[in-house]
Amino acid sequence: MPYTTEDGGRLNNFAIEPKMYQAEPPTATQKRNYLITGILAIGLIAGIIYVAVLVSSAS
């Protein structure tokens, strides 16, 4: 564990920081997958809202 000593003799224990790296931009395949996932998510939410409207007006 990495300890540092402050003024007055107090010890501080710091967490080990992960290595930093540069993020890479998404590839064309990843962009297409994001688009498909977004369309499916919008369809799912619209379907849930549609079912909720049908059930609430059924009575």
Image (spheres, helix red, strand yellow):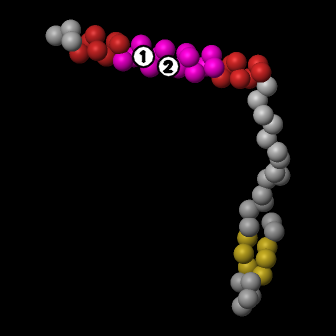
Q: Is residue 28 above or below residue 16?
A: above
Region in magenta: 35-49
Instruction: Name the residue rendered at 50%, 19% in the picture.
Output: 42
Q: Residue furthest bottom?
A: 8
| SS state under label 2 | helix
Q: Residue at x 63, y 20 (%)?
A: 35
Please indicate whether residue 36 sits to the left or right of residue 3 in the image.
Answer: left
Placement of 35 over or under 23, stated as above or below: above
Query: What's the CA distance linking mark 1 and mark 2?
Result: 6 Å
Is residue 48 rendered magenta in the image?
A: yes
> Which residue does the image show at 44% across and 19% down from the upper left?
45
- The quadrant the C terminus occupies is top left
Q: Magenta part mainly helix, strand or loop?
A: helix
Q: Label 2, on which residue?
A: 42
Tell me if residue 3 comes above or below residue 9 in the rendering.
Answer: above
> Tag 1's secondary structure?
helix
**Residue 25: which quarter of the image?**
top right
- In the rendered image, residue 41, in percent from the top left (x then y), is placed at 53, 20
From the viewer's perspective, is 13 left or right of 38?
A: right
Disc number for residue 54: none
Residue 26, given in percent of the width and then of the height, sits at 76, 29
**Residue type highlighted by circle 1:** Ala
What residue do we see at 42% from left, 13% from top? Answer: 47
Residue 53 is situated, as x and y percent measured from the top left of the image, at 28, 15
| Nearer-the-camera pick, 58 or 40 | 40
Q: Amino acid at mark 2?
A: Ile
The reply to whether callout 1 and callout 2 are in contact (CB within 8 Å) is yes
Mark seen at residue 46: 1
Q: Nearer the viewer, residue 15 or 59?
A: 59
* Mark 1 Cα shell of 10 Å, populated few (<14), some (14-19), many (≥20): few
* Number of marks drawn: 2
